[in-house]
Amino acid sequence: MQAKDHKNDNGIEIVFIGPSYGESILIKDNENNWFVIDSCIDLATKESLPLKYLSDVGVNTVERVKMIIITHWHDDHIRGISQLCEKCDNASIVIPLTFGQREFVNIFSYSITDELGFRRSGNLREMLRVINVVDQKQLELIYAKQNETIFQSNNSENKLSIFALSPGNLDYRLSCSGIARAYKSILDGGRLHDDRINPNLFSIALLIKIGKSSLLLGGDLEVHPDPRRGIDNALKSHCLSDNISGLYKVAHHGSKTAYHKQLGQSLRKDNFSIITPWRKGRNAIPTCSEIELHKQHSDQLFITAKPRNSKPIKKRSNMIDKAMRDATNFRYLYSVAKPGHIIMKAKYSDLVSGNNKWEIALSNQSEKL
């Protein structure tokens, strides 16, 4: 990707990056400030893909990246995020107010985690690196919760605002209950156990308003039987009142648990919807049937990497699995290491006035469904 000078470009740009494992979203406002949501890496070089994109288009990350939002602590959303934080000296870092047991102990008691009897997996190690960067660079750390304003420009010529639609009050209570159970286990001389809570339900969903236009970013939220949680609860956020979004990042990789019939009421009929798929392991998301579900909400549905129509693979022996991994590792890396980019650009004046006009450029694996 060739570098491009953004200095005289006062339009809005949104970039969706999805290499089939992981995702990232970059947003440029009309003052050439950048906001980054989540991170993924190039599997060959281990480089943070949002950081690479910013470098390729000539962005001074120290001056221009104003905010980095970590929707939740799953590995496919935070790989390379510490690299990004390292290069953005003036960025605020946003994380969910809710934590799983291990995440909480890791982030607030990381000096004693080795004594607490749990293995620090890849996402926890990356989490620690982020917190260390925040402390070393004295960056602002913001804890996001439903109905809170995360960003609002002080410039009357910039009408961009960012609001959190989740996590909600019940999520916070369940998070606190899990933390209490964790410390009870520790005080009783026991070990931390895996959470009973789906971390996706702690994900930050976002509403971005630009004048009369709005964009809805679903994070990894899913539908939950309890309407006080997940997508149901996010749709009740007062931030969504009278806001019909013209662009939607489909929640949770376009899975069937991300489909909610009432979501269509929060989207314009001419909306653009983007799926960032999951294509690692035994299950591929979305399937063809799941894509058809989400087409009910949009005639303009795009995906950052080609979907794979597959059924769950039956369990094989460890020996067979290892042989197949060794034989196919190169092909797997090739298939997912070339990230798809969906680059959407709009005139600031169009969005402010409510015109949902976007220029769309697709690269690598990305395509219109």
Image (cartoon, rainbow, N blue to C red):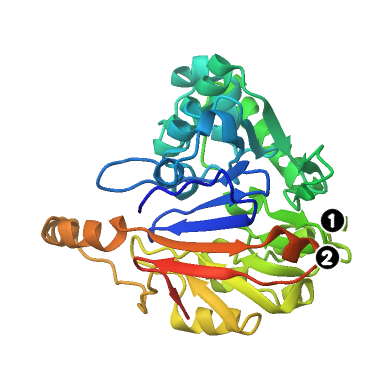
Where is the N terminus found, in terms of image quarters? bottom left
Density class for disc 2 (Cα within 10 Å; few <14, some 14-19, many ≥20) is many
Q: Position of residue 255 (x, y in %)?
A: 53, 70
The type of residue carrying mark 2 is Asn
Q: Position of residue 287 (x, y in %)?
A: 44, 77
Relative to 232, say whether 86 is above or below. Answer: above
Q: Which mark is residue 243?
A: 2
Q: Residue at x 16, y 62 (%)?
A: 328
Q: Amino acid at mark 1?
A: Cys
Residue 228's label in the rendered image is none
Tell me if mark 1 has few (under 14), some (14-19) or many (20+) residues whose alpha carbon lies within 10 angstroms of its own.
Answer: many
Secondary element under disc 2, as helix, strand or loop, is loop
Tell which of 201 and 364 is nearer to you.
364
Q: Is residue 107 above or below residue 339?
A: above
For numbered disc 1, what is the local secondary structure? helix
Do residues under tags 1 and 2 come within 8 Å of each other at their CB atoms?
yes
User: Looking at the picture, does residue 204 appear above or below residue 185?
Assistant: below
In whole angstroms, how far apart are the C-alphas of marks 1 and 2? Answer: 8 Å
* Disc on res. 239: 1
Residue 251 in the figure: left or right of residue 117: right
